[in-house]
């Protein structure tokens, strides 16, 4: 039994080993997408978040079979190499990353948040990532990064954020 | 030197700036490989049979059916382990009641002492088969009476876990004359405090692979804070130390939870027996059940106070719940002992501290290491004193904090001014001007000071080694055994090297955490790595720098003391146009046979053990001091507490990377908030009731307050460039500041953590006891 996914923009056909296989297991074990992290396997931590047809979901709570025919975007699909997503750039610049294990899911949630709301308040950013646990940063610099990325994406220079860096 | 003087004198190019960390770019696109991302060809999958109950004798253990399964390659029990019980290294252990039987066996010795204790190991062709094999192991338990409260466990009739007493460490500290101190007091203030069981809850559960490498070296790749456990594993297997190697990975959070071994020994045993690569990958639930926790403490305080607010005497009785085995509990207790009187000038102190075995999950290292529990007690107690004598909590602290030349509880002299009064004031004044509470709620503010040591106790003879070498193209290689747990341990080494050699951080590669190939740096624990390995790298880089400067001086026909290195040039500081590219200097060194690398060892100052009768004597080379103020909103009806703003001020000595230092403080504050308001690892009669992140709740971005982060840079630290350690201290003061803020808001004094709505309402007298 196979599923067909548009994975990071490319059509792929992947065998499903059992009905209970989750999208997380499929992505990590069958496709080798190590940019999807498993922190709990039951939807508590958000480390495995991906965009499923544009919506941020816990890939551990989606059965692989449910994703058949869907678009799946993982962290690397958002940006890699020289082509980073503004949120990725802002996370680097603002120090929103410590151990880095929550980062893939966190960036996915922030991407979904900014897609829906280009000008979120700090409280709205916090709400958007409330399903993503981070044990290292205290969230403060992640919220800073999201504010700065939002400004960047709106075409504003992100003056406040830049000033802080200089 | 005053703060201003130091800041004016110091001009660094890299040090102290808020630069992106060198590992951030990889992490933000998930190029960083964590332990769970590694597999090996032809590998087996390991799994661990764990006890489902806290106190029992194994009446029958029959592995025949599991061993008979096709595709199962090994089923191991205690009988297969050459050396089952390995004492935790406790150099200078002085506990009067040290109990060798309290050391944990690698696999159960036939007696089950906590729920989750490892009994047997399986290696099989698939992970599913390994789990199935566990299910067909025939095990029968005979339940034994357990003991689940440390105070009960101290009673003569309590069931014993090991030997003839459950007390595994007991210390008595005595400074000055307690009776005299109380005689000088106008009033006596008493209080009892309790802290709860806490899990590290790092985001990355335990995972790893092991294989037999060339020459039969057992090689283990896993996330750990301590690659030096290769020696423990060698002793377990009766192998030379040189035949075991641990390659650490970037660690998905540590906080002390990967200081003891997690799955290393199991990986080693299975690969050693099967001669095949083995992978172990545990679930969050298994992780929660099986690594150490932060100790619950019971603390009873009695203080003598003058009417003017001067504290003349402090007596504390401290009991920690060590759980089922010793692990690092005796050490944790020493940190509690020495910090019990806080950073306050109290001439007469007595502390009696005990660590006690119970059938609860074992407790060991966690961020704060005993200094967090005492901070909760002394800081809430100080607010109690403030209320009794009618002095503002901020003023009471300013009146009693230690200054240079004073001594703390162990009689150790404070060698540099801690600036606590300044930091307390700055934190307090940084809180925004009071906002209006919502209807039915009240706003309150609390303050707390803290101090925590960085670096090991001084009788452990701590060292760290590091290598720095410059390549002919001017790029640089640093090698250090340091495990990076996410705090930027490796990145700091790049910053230090960059500063000294004038090479940009992106041209520096830092190789870390390999027990065979990187110089051993000791553990990433005790807030010691910036201090220890930072100094080792500094020393190695400076030696390379001297060689480069001498060579450049010859090339530029000037003297080395006129030269500096920056932007990959050597240049004359008096005549900037006189310069030569660093790569040419390196080439000239190579030609002349001048060493381009250095291996340096940094040795922390050593002392003898403090007097074991009184615990008077130096115990640490330095402390990090700080203060936190917090503003909360409390619902008078429901008791719900919301943290609005936290202002934290710390003397970091010298920030190496401002961004990383702020990140450590903010992360510490929110971990402290979890301890203060939310987290509680609930265990009922030894059985875990919070087995996953659905029940064991962590602070989310919504729970976390906005944090105002303030650094003081006095240059007084013993780390590189005068830096102090900052890993653990920021998490100490949050919980007491919250408790004090709740009291300020509604008059409810909550002395047992966490501060739940129920406890607030109860403290207000609205619920029956």
Image: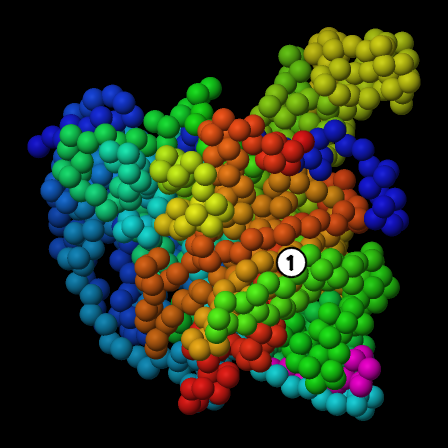
Residue B608, image quadrant: bottom right
Instruction: State the extent of the magenta-drawn residues as a range.
Output: B300-310
Letter of the chain that mark 1 sits on in the rendering: B
Single out the residue that lies furthest toward the left. Answer: A1
Residue shown at 53% from the left, 62% from the top: B643
Residue B51: in magenta span = no
Q: Position of residue A131 (x, y in %)?
A: 36, 50
- What colour scheme was applied to this rendering of the protein? rainbow
Of helix, strand and loop, which one carries label 1?
A: loop
Where residue B473 sits in the image (x, y, percent)?
A: 64, 12
Q: Is residue B545 above or below residue B170?
A: above
Q: Which residue is mark 1?
A: B432
Where in the figure is residue B290, as x and y percent of width and height?
Answer: 37, 59
From this viewpoint, is residue B108 visible?
Answer: no
Packing grade of label 1 (10 A; few <14, some 14-19, many >=20) is few
Residue B721 sits in quarter: top right
Based on the picture, tell me whether residue B307 belongs to the magenta stretch.
yes
| Residue at 40% from the left image edge and 25% from the top image edge | A79
User: Horizontally, is B489 left or right of B82 in the view?
Assistant: right
- Nearer the observer, B701 or B300: B701
Q: Is residue B524 visible?
A: yes
Q: Is residue B350 above or below residue B113?
A: below
Which is more toward the observer, B612 or B724? B724
Q: Is B434 displayed left or right of A133 in the figure?
A: right
- Numbered circles on residues, count: 1
Name which quarter of the figure residue B475 lies in.
top right
In this rendered view, identify the residue nearer to me: A118 or B741: A118
Picture layout, residue B625 above or below residue B713: below
The quadrant of the rendering that contains the C terminus of chain B is: bottom left
**Residue depicted at x 42% and y 86%:** B767
């Amino acid at each position: 039994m196979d599923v067909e996914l548009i994975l990071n923009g490319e059509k792929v056909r992947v065998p499903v080993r059992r009905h209970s296989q989750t999208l997380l297991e499929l992505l990590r074990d069958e496709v080798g997408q190590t940019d999807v992290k498993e922190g709990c396997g039951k939807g508590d931590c958000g480390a495995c978040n991906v965009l499923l047809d544009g919506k941020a979901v816990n890939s551990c709570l989606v059965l692989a079979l449910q994703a058949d025919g869907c678009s799946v975007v993982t962290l690397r699909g958002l940006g890699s190499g020289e082509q980073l997503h503004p949120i990725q750039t802002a996370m680097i610049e603002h120090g929103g990353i410590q151990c880095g294990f929550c980062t893939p899911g966190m960036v996915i949630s922030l991407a979904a948040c900014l897609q829906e709301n280009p000008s979120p308040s700090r409280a709205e950013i916090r709400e958007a990532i409330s399903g993503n646990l981070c044990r290292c940063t205290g969230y403060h610099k992640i919220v800073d990064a999201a504010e700065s990325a939002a400004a960047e994406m709106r075409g504003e220079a992100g003056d406040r954020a830049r000033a802080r860096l200089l | 030197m005053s703060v201003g003087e130091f800041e004016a004198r110091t001009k660094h190019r890299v040090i102290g700036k808020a630069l992106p960390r060198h590992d951030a770019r990889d992490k933000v696109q998930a190029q960083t490989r964590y332990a769970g991302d590694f597999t090996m060809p032809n590998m087996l999958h390991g799994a661990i049979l764990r006890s489902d109950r806290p106190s029992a004798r194994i009446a029958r253990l029959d592995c025949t059916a599991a061993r008979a399964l096709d595709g199962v390659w090994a089923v191991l029990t205690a009988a297969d382990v050459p050396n089952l019980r390995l004492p935790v290294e406790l150099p200078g252990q002085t506990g009067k009641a040290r109990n060798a039987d309290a050391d944990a066996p690698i696999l159960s010795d036939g007696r089950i002492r906590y729920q989750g204790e490892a009994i047997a190991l399986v290696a099989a062709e698939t992970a599913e088969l390994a789990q199935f094999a566990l299910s067909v192991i025939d095990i029968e338990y005979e339940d034994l009476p357990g003991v689940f409260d440390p105070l009960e466990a101290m009673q003569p009739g309590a069931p014993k876990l090991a030997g003839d007493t459950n007390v595994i460490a007991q210390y008595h500290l005595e400074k000055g004359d307690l009776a005299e101190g109380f005689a000088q007091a106008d009033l006596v203030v008493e209080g009892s405090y309790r802290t709860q069981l806490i899990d590290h809850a790092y985001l990355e559960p335990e995972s790893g692979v092991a294989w037999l490498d060339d020459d039969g070296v057992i090689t283990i790749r896993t996330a750990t804070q301590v690659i030096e456990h290769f020696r423990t594993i060698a002793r377990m297997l009766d192998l030379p130390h040189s035949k075991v190697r641990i390659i650490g990975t970037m660690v998905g959070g540590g906080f002390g939870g990967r200081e003891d071994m997690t799955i290393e020994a199991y990986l080693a045993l299975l690969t050693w027996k099967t001669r095949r690569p083995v992978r172990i990958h545990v679930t969050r639930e298994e992780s929660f059940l099986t690594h150490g926790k932060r100790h619950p403490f019971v603390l009873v305080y009695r203080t003598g106070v003058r009417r003017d607010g001067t504290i003349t005497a402090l007596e504390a009785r401290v009991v920690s719940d060590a759980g089922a085995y010793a692990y690092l509990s005796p050490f944790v207790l020493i940190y509690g002992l020495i910090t019990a009187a806080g950073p306050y000038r109290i001439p007469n102190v007595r502390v009696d501290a005990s660590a006690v075995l119970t059938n609860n999950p074992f407790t060991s290292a966690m961020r704060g290491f005993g200094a967090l529990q005492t901070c909760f007690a002394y800081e809430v107690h100080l607010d109690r004193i403030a209320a009794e004598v009618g002095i503002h909590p901020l003023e009471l602290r300013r009146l009693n904090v230690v200054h240079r030349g004073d001594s703390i509880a162990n009689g150790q002299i404070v060698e540099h001014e801690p600036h606590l009064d300044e930091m307390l004031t700055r934190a307090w004044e940084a809180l925004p001007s009071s906002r209006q509470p919502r209807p039915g709620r009240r706003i309150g503010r609390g303050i707390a000071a803290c101090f925590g040591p960085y670096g090991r106790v001084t009788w452990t003879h701590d060292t760290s080694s590091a290598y720095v070498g410059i390549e002919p193209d001017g790029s640089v290689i640093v090698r250090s055994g340091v495990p990076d747990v996410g705090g930027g341990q490796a990145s700091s080494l790049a910053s230090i090297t960059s500063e000294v050699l004038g090479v940009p951080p992106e041209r520096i590669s830092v190789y870390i955490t390999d027990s065979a190939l990187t110089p051993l740096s000791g553990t990433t624990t005790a807030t010691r790595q910036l201090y220890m390995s930072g100094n080792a790298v500094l020393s190695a880089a400076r030696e390379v720098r001297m060689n480069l400067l001498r060579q450049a001086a010859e090339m530029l026909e000037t003297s080395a003391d006129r030269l500096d290195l920056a932007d990959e040039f050597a240049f004359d500081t008096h005549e900037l146009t006189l310069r030569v590219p660093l790569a040419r200097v390196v080439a000239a060194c190579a030609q002349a046979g001048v060493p381009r690398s250095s291996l340096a060892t940094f040795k922390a100052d050593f002392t003898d053990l403090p007097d074991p009768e009184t615990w008077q004597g130096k115990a640490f080379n330095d402390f990090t001091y700080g203060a936190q103020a917090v503003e909360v909103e409390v619902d008078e009806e429901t008791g719900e507490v919301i943290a609005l703003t936290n202002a934290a001020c710390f003397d970091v000595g010298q920030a190496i990377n401002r961004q990383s230092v702020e990140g450590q403080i903010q992360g510490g504050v929110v971990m402290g908030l979890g301890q203060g308001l939310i987290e509680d690892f609930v265990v009922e009669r030894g059985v875990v009731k919070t087995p996953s992140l659905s029940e064991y709740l962590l602070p989310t971005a919504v729970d976390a307050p906005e944090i105002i982060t303030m650094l003081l840079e006095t240059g007084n630290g013993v780390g590189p460039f005068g830096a102090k350690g900052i890993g653990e201290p920021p998490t100490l003061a949050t919980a007491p500041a919250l408790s004090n803020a709740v009291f300020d808001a509604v008059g409810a004094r909550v002395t047992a953590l966490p501060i739940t709505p129920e406890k607030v309402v109860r403290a207000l007298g609205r619920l029956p006891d």
